[in-house]
Image (spheres, coloured by chain):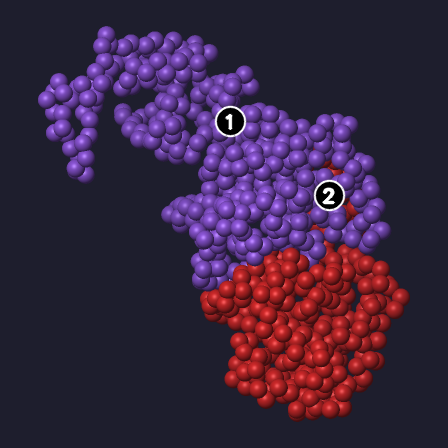
Chain colours: A red, B purple
Amino acid sequence: MSEAGAATLPSEAPLFVVAETHDVGDHHLRVLTPAREDWLDVLAAKYRKLRMLSRHPAQALSLEGVDILSVDEVESELATSVIPTYEEGNFGVGRSDFAEVILTVTLEEEYGCRYGYQSLCHRELRQRPGRGIDIIGVEISTDPTVVSLVLGEAKTSSDANSPPAVVDTNSDCLAVQHRGHLDNIAATADEVWAASRDAESVEIQQLLRIAGSLLRKGAGGLRIIAASGMARPATAQAPGDFGTFHADPAKYSPADVRFLLFRLPGHIDELTKELLARAAADSGEVA
Amino acid sequence: VTESISDAFASLLSSLDLDGVAQAATDQALIERVSTGAASWDDSRELVETLALLEIEAMTAYRSSLGSGEAATAARRQTEEVFALAGGCAQLIAEIRSRGVAVPTADDDALPAGLDLPFRVAVSALVSRRTSDVRLSLDSMVERGELVAAQAPGHEPTDLDWEGRLLADTFGAFVLLVRKQDGWLDIDTALEALDRLRDVQSDLQSDYLTNANESGTLGSSTARLVALFHLAQCVTLAGRYLATGEGSRQGLQTRLDRHRDNAHEAAQTVGVQGGATLAVLTDLLWAGCRELVANSIWSHVEGLGDQVSQFASLLASRGRDRPVLELWPSQQEALAGNVLDQYRRAVLVQMPTSAGKTLLAEFMIIQSRALSVSSTIAYVVPTRALVNQVTRDLRADLGPLGLSVEQAVPAYELDPSEQAMLSGSAGSSRDNTGEAKPSRAPRRRLGS
């Protein structure tokens, strides 16, 4: 097992490119398609990395200057530990995870989003309060007086209808989920704070905490982004797939809508299985 | 992206209007609810979030204050103000908790139960120069025995794994070093607890690493240990300095900085499973240890000669009822303002009563005698009662250094009202506020 696959991310070339733009003012509604032949390989590597519990090689850590404790055993572990390490059964990927990893990668590549809680890499922590929102992240824009709070939900759908039921119709559709986050600000702020505990760095943790407090207080300086990611087979994708997010984006006020629709070649189930196989093969696990 | 986030962070923090967000720190209605036992869970949640935000702002200012120049001075002022608010929040939260109201934690119980708030109060007090104000609070918040895991060799706790033990004893020892209850007892307890870690390391560490390996978290668990080793080393360095004064302040703080950097790197490696929280705790502990060293009496007598150092050792000695292990902020400020500058012909020190003028005077006496062994120093005070008190204090403090202290008082003493009557000025002396002001009695000269 090597870290080479994960280390190639983020790749120089974006994984997805915008094929269609249906923006309404500040609301982004876009159709994206894979930009490179190896998109599924790169996605698998990204998925592997998200499932890692560690972000940096432990071998480089220093114990210099520590004399009150014996460092031999820990130094030995550092020298022999292979990063990344995986937990058994890491790759139990489902269709929702498939959409989530695509949305995660794209929000990071296209918008510079940084994350706190991601259900993908905290599957073992599902009981935490943050479980209600797939992705909680923050973005810094060129305006230093504003921090953006990203509340992300991801779906897949092969539904022949347009928009598919996961957009506006189902009990847990994107519209219901986002409106729920926005209608219950106190609970959402709680989730943002909970997400900050699992942030990847101190800066992100602090930004999340600031964003959570601004949200709770209804204070200025905060932009809320209702981000949706939906993976669709190219054969099913249709112009009306954005549903109310395009027809009436004001329905999601005070958030700005960011709906990214991923038009993918082939069947979603097959792609999901392939993602799992490639991620597991690269890690040494048996798919 | 990480670099751009870091660069933008300071700018964002200064641009956002966070005053309203952190208003709970000074919300009188909320404070009233806490003091009357009427605080709710929502109140405590608001305070917990406010505390976390204030710590963000305070640590950002603290890092800026470590430079030089006017910007650093302003940052230091801001650091102290914000940490004072943070400490107030932590004390309010502790008050709520003491009344049995459930209190959420911002960091998911990263520290062992009962240690989180004392730790935050201790750091805030140190950096905002309010240590003496919060000692009583720290006393009431936690017993000495609760602050470190093991009471004595052979009485090891059984409910803590190696990581829990490192956390408990490192952060608990730090609180003890700040509190200094019963003088040396807290310091000794802290250093003993840290020393005992090595004794239990082999047993606890093997089990911890074995469990981590079986659960597939060996990498992050090992990194966590690396971070905690560096933090334990930080507290040990600060504690040893308090106990012995060995080494230079600058050199020690450089070592603390290096351990902080290494702990931070390890915390980053821990990553999304609590690495950020560990990094925040690292920064707070590092700042606290730096301030412990800076406040210590030893750091203020560096470079002032053997006799001043000898005097400091005497003040801090275990034989004293109330050893002087650190100087008060007013005294630190005076020393930093070159009150002992031997090239000045005259120095005026103006401080409120009980702000520590006598100790400063003693330092000046010691230094004057060191520079001129045959000199006679006059210590002038305005009342007979003070003559007796100062003589007693000076004899106790300076006698062991071979200095003779004698007192001289006049045969009679006028009180201020008598003086005013005799001079015919009674009722006529008024300051510009229009209030009556007694005339001063003549000063008397004391020989030494």
The C terminus of chain A is located in which quarter?
bottom right
Q: Residue at x 85, y 72 (%)?
A: A277
List the residue tagged with mark 1.
B325
x then y, percent, for residue B53: 53, 55
x then y, percent, for residue B21: 48, 59
Q: Residue at x 66, y 53 (%)?
A: B108
At label 2, which amino acid type do we have?
A: Glu
Q: Quadrant of residue B438?
A: top left
List the residue tagged with mark 2.
B163
Residue A265 sits above or below residue A65 on the image:
below
Q: Secondary structure at mark 2?
A: helix
Residue A203 sits above or below residue B120 on the image:
below
Question: How many other residues sit within 10 Å of disc 1, few (<14), some (14-19) or many (≥20)?
Answer: many
Residue B30 vs residue A180: left or right? Answer: left
At label 1, which amino acid type do we have?
A: Leu
Chain identifier of the residue bearing label 1 in the image? B
Query: In the orientation shown, which residue stands out farthest toward the right?
Result: A286
Residue B25 vs residue A201: left or right? Answer: left
